Image (spheres, grey):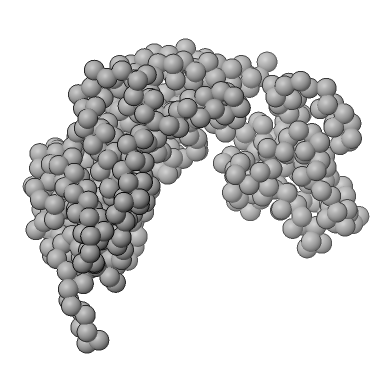
């Protein structure tokens, strides 16, 4: 599934319950991160739950793996990865994630006051793109 | 007995609608909501006689100095200290404890000495002592609680001894609600020549304090938890101990005489109140304490104890819910876990339902870990909490549990 499809799916939801039930399903479907990566080294700081992000570089593109011990965050990670995965650093830098989250109606997850760590995760992804 | 629905009208914030609905506020342990009387008292100062206290020779300065010192008297009476000289105004309870660790601690704690604290301390009553021990070479000793969060008498006495210089303990845990037997702890500490500091941040909100009866050497609590404003806290210290302590910070108001060669310091409590004090906040804090006194602790306790019983019963209706902290003597603090659901997930659904609780380590990471968790949800009560608040909490928790249940 790509992000356009996801935005279309989200447009059918009538309330937050339906929307976030879907986010939870995405969280359940997210490939779990191997426990060996669940260390301080890969932890994204500034989250109320534990969040890990691991980049893999190949053929000029970055593939990310991520995980969290909170299921809603896992679901949001699944969406963030859908947005950013297997893109070139230049593509990553050009993505306006806030706009996409607004289209999904999930913008509350990217507000600085909500300390679920998604903002930190996005900066971390952009940081990896900058460094490449 | 006061009518809780009537007194709620005195708290403007309960009239606020979020997404068209009132908010169920169950985070009084973090900070209490404030009655109109507190705002009025503070606004009155700014409108009618605001100036810098202790300095001027004109009407406003005299009026605010008198109101500020009257606030000190209100605090003295609230905890039954012998004299107002024993009441030091600080920014908050954290600063009160830091003050003791940095002054009395640096003066009296040496390498090889021990500082004894409970396993259930807030970081504010842990990190200052840990730092003191690191700097002086003293040892931080911790007495444990059992799996229910109960005080373990033998474990405490086993760790108290000749080397103990100070015992710093919470009167009521902000995570478990456990009430430690502070009178017994103080007596035992004095027997071995140790001093006692009581962190009364939580206790002061729910139960009357008598520092003479407890016979503690220091006691700390804050204004924002006792239904008053932020930015103001109290350190109580026995006069004879405070008198021997060096200043904490240096500057205005804490001096007696200043020359480039030498400065002499003011008497207590001014010696510990460097700079322009938070006078309006102190006056607001006193108003919060007066509000508590007006309702009366007897009725507050009666109201809250009935609600504690109700909350305990109703929370257990939520499948997989486990209350963390079930000491026989506990206050209105309910930390809990719901199966394997992350507290952040629970808080998400509760927020959608306008139910305000706290999640995380509650600034007391060691005790949360000791109980087997990284993070806990916590609901807590105040004098204005109602059965309906608990009903809303339970309804939202039932919804959250169903929402996240893995089919």
Q: Quadrant of the C terminus of chain B?
A: top right
The answer to whether any part of residue B99 appears in the image is no
Asked if residue B303 is positioned above or below residue A71 in the image, the reply reads above
**What residue lies at 44% left-to-right and 40% top-to-bottom?**
B362
**What residue lies at 76% left-to-right and 20% top-to-bottom?**
A14
Q: In this rendering, would B360 be left or right of B272? A: right
Which residue lies most toward the right here? A59
**What residue lies at 14% left-to-right and 65% top-to-bottom?**
B267
Q: In this rendering, would B296 be left or right of B347? A: left
Asked if residue A78 is positioned above or below residue B7 in the image, the reply reads below
Asked if residue B346 is positioned above or below residue A87 in the image, the reply reads above
Which residue lies most toward the bottom here? B261
Q: Quadrant of the N terminus of chain B?
A: top left
* Percent position of residue B157, x then y: 18, 41
Nearer to the camera, B72 or B156? B72
Say how many tags the image has. Answer: 0
The answer to whether any part of residue B220 appears in the image is yes
Residue A35: quadrant of the picture: top right
* Percent position of residue B403, x then y: 64, 19
**What residue lies at 44% left-to-right and 18% top-to-bottom?**
B390
* Percent position of residue B17, x then y: 54, 27
* Percent position of residue B277, x then y: 30, 59
Asked if residue B335 is positioned above or below residue A64 in the image, the reply reads above
Nearer to the camera, B105 or B67? B67
């Amino acid at each position: 599934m790509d992000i356009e499809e996801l935005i279309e799916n989200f447009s059918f939801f009538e309330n937050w319950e339906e929307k976030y039930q879907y986010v939870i399903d995405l969280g359940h479907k997210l490939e779990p991160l191997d426990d060996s990566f669940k260390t301080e080294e890969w932890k994204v700081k500034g989250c109320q739950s534990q969040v890990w992000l691991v980049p893999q570089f190949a053929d000029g593109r970055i593939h990310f793996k991520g995980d969290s011990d909170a299921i809603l965050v896992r679901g949001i990670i699944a969406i963030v990865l859908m947005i950013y995965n297997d893109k070139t650093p230049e593509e990553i830098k050009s993505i306006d994630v806030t706009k996409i989250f607004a289209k999904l109606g999930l913008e509350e997850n990217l507000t600085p006051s909500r300390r679920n760590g998604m903002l930190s995760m996005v900066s971390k992804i952009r940081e990896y793109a900058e460094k490449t | 007995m006061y009518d809780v629905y009537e007194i709620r009208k005195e708290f403007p914030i309960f009239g606020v609608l979020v997404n068209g609905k009132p908010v169920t506020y169950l985070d009084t342990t973090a900070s209490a909501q404030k009655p109109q009387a507190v705002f009025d008292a503070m606004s009155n100062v700014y409108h009618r006689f605001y100036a810098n206290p202790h300095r001027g020779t004109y009407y406003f300065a005299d009026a605010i100095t008198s109101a500020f010192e009257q606030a000190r008297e209100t605090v003295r009476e609230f905890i039954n200290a012998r004299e107002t000289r024993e009441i030091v105004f600080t920014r908050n309870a954290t600063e009160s404890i830091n003050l003791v660790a940095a002054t009395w601690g640096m003066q009296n704690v040496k390498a090889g000495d021990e500082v004894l604290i409970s396993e259930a301390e807030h970081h504010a009553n842990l990190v200052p002592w840990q730092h003191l021990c690191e700097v002086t070479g003293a040892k931080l000793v911790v007495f444990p609680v059992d799996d229910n969060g109960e005080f373990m008498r033998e474990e405490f006495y086993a760790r108290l001894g000749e080397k103990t210089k100070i015992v710093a303990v919470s009167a009521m845990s902000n995570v478990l609600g456990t009430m430690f037997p502070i009178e017994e702890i103080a007596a035992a500490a004095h027997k071995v020549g140790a001093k006692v500091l009581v962190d009364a941040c939580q206790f002061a909100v729910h139960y009357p304090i008598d520092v003479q009866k407890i016979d503690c050497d220091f006691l700390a609590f804050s204004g924002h938890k006792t239904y008053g404003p932020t930015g103001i806290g109290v350190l109580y210290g026995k006069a004879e101990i405070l008198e021997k302590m060096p200043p904490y910070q240096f500057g205005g108001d804490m001096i007696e005489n200043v020359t480039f060669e030498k400065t002499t310091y003011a008497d207590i409590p001014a010696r510990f109140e460097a700079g322009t004090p938070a006078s309006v906040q102190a006056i607001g804090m006193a108003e919060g304490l007066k509000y508590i006194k007006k309702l009366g602790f007897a009725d507050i306790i009666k109201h809250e104890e009935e609600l504690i019983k109700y909350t305990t019963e109703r929370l257990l209706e939520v499948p997989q819910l486990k209350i963390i902290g079930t000491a026989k003597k506990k206050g209105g603090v309910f930390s809990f876990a719901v199966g394997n659901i992350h507290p952040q997930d629970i808080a998400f659904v509760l927020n959608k339902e306008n139910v305000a609780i706290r999640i995380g380590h509650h600034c007391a990471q060691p005790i949360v870990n000791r109980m087997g968790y990284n993070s806990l949800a916590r609901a807590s009560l105040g004098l204005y909490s109602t059965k309906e608040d608990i009903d809303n909490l339970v309804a939202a928790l039932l919804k959250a549990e169903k929402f996240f249940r893995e089919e």
